[in-house]
């Protein structure tokens, strides 16, 4: 009888322990990018090390994530304990006291190991307000086999003229191969990001020194005309619906000869498990127009804690785990070094195991390090940001402008009409926000 009672007592204690161990549930809002999906698959490691913390994932498409997270954090709704946000939001939200400063990530976290440009982008006055999960710039990715067959050689730093000529020559619509894939899906982080970086290289800018919108300039006319004409002549059908994920799928399936997009895509394209063209992909800098600026951007997806979270301590533990050097080693152990999240830590770019399988590594680090958010354009501007304008109004305005750009690409608006609409919307928004008088 004593043995039975002892066993029951032990079982009850274990049940109580299990229940108490699941008392803290972290709700994590994230984007449906491959690196984030991989992180979800690996979180059994975190749960095993932190039995008192359970995880609840809420995964969104990129544009939806931004809308849901922005609404929740601005209203202090407290729906999420951890949010996935970009370099655009971090300084703006931190200054509004919407984010918790990350001061307790542990002694072994090694924040100085974060690439300086990325670390600065997610800090305010030297304090981290988000931890980068992966960082990126943009680059030109291309099919080396198709280039070789056509007798073309990609320069290390291509011009837009070269890219346009190569894309036209490499287009074979009968075979289902298109010369170039570019973001066309409307959204401030989708087509507007690409076109803003492209505009920087063409000498265009969003605003002059007096915050007056500049969409009615020849530089923007050249940027948008070049983009629309290039995709109509050498892009895939339905390009106005394609964002990062759609173009990644197209290129991986052998449908694109050139793709200008985030450096983070390189690891997927180079992995035979993810890509039919692995081993046939080359990498170059983002294009330029000979004016001293390339279409390179600077971005990171980061994990941050909303000020309304009631589980700050547990959230800090998870963020420290997911953005640590040991997490990178965990991914390498489970999936291989080619799949580790790139662009955040200097030590990764000194690791011979990674460099051996990542021919794009040095170019990625060089692109991230060379990006200059404080001087993004050919002529001076009053704002910070390469592929975005770091003001609160940009999130809404950038999406509206992106809808006009997408309409020009689909043919429902002319380029001239799209730019006129963008100019009018920007003038109205800047007046309402008090930038213009």
Image: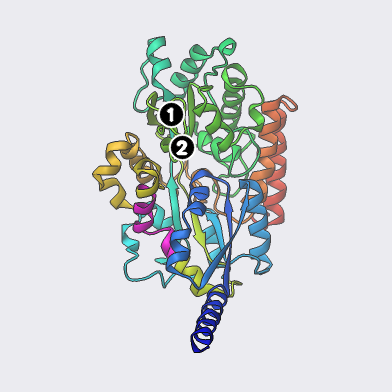
Labelled disc at residue 265: 2
Residue 349 can be seen in this image:
yes
The residue at the point 35 percent across, 49 percent down is 333
Q: In this view, does 3 lie above or below 240?
A: below
Q: Is mark 2 on a helix, strand or loop?
A: helix
Q: What element carries label 1?
A: strand
Q: Furthest-front residue in view?
A: 1
The residue at the point 39 percent across, 20 percent down is 144
User: For this view, does 126 lie left or right of residue 303?
Assistant: left
User: For this view, does 287 lie left or right of residue 75?
Assistant: left
Q: Furthest-right residue in view?
A: 412
Residue 400 vs residue 182, the one in the foreground:
182
- Residue 336 lies in what quarter of the image? top left
Characterize the local packing of mark 1: few (<14), some (14-19) or many (20 or more) Cα atoms within 10 angstroms.
Answer: many
State yes or no: residue 236 in magenta: no
Mark 1 and mark 2 residues within 8 Å of each other at the beta carbon: yes
Specify start and end residues of the magenta stretch as a single range. 320-332
Mark 1, residue position? 141
Residue 174: percent from the left, percent from the top? 59, 10
């Amino acid at each position: 009888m004593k043995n039975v009672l002892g066993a029951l007592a032990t079982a009850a204690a274990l049940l109580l322990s299990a229940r108490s161990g699941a008392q803290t549930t972290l709700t994590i809002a994230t984007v449906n990018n491959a690196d984030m999906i991989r992180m979800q698959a690996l979180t059994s490691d975190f749960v095993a090390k932190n039995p008192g913390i359970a995880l609840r994932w809420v995964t969104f498409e990129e544009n939806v994530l931004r809308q849901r997270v922005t609404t929740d954090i601005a209203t202090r709704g407290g729906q999420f304990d951890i949010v996935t946000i970009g370099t655009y939001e971090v300084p703006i939200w931190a200054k509004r006291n919407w984010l918790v400063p990350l001061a307790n990530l542990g002694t072994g976290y090694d924040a100085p190991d974060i690439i300086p440009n990325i670390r600065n982008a997610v800090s305010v006055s030297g304090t981290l307000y988000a931890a980068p999960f992966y960082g990126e710039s943009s680059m030109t990715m291309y099919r080396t086999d198709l280039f070789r067959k056509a007798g073309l050689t990609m320069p290390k730093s291509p011009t837009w003229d070269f890219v346009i000529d190569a894309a036209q020559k490499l287009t074979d619509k009968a075979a289902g191969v298109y010369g170039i894939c570019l973001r066309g899906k409307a959204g401030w982080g989708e087509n507007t990001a690409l076109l803003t970086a492209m505009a920087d290289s063409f000498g265009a800018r969003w605003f002059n020194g007096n915050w007056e919108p500049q969409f009615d300039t020849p530089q923007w006319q050249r940027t948008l005309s070049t983009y629309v004409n290039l995709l109509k002549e050498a892009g895939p059908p339905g390009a106005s619906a394609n964002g990062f994920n759609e173009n990644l799928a197209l290129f991986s399936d052998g449908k694109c000869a050139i793709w200008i997009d985030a450096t983070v895509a390189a690891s997927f394209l180079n992995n035979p498990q993810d890509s039919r063209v692995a081993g046939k992909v080359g990498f170059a800098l983002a294009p330029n127009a000979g004016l001293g600026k390339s279409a390179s951007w600077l971005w990171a997806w980061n994990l941050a804690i909303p000020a309304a979270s009631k589980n700050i301590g547990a959230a800090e533990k998870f963020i420290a785990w997911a953005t640590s050097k040991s997490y990178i080693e965990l991914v390498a152990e489970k999936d291989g070094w080619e799949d580790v999240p790139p662009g955040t830590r200097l030590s990764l770019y000194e690791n011979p195991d990674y460099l051996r399988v990542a021919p794009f590594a040095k170019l990625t680090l060089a692109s991230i390090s060379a990006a200059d958010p404080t001087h993004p354009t050919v002529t001076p501007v009053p704002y910070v940001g390469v592929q975005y304008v770091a003001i609160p109004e940009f999130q809404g305005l950038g999406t509206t402008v992106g809808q006009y750009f997408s309409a020009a690409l689909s043919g429902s608006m002319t380029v001239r009409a799209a730019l006129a609409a963008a100019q009018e919307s920007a003038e109205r928004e800047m007046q309402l926000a008090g930038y213009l008088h």
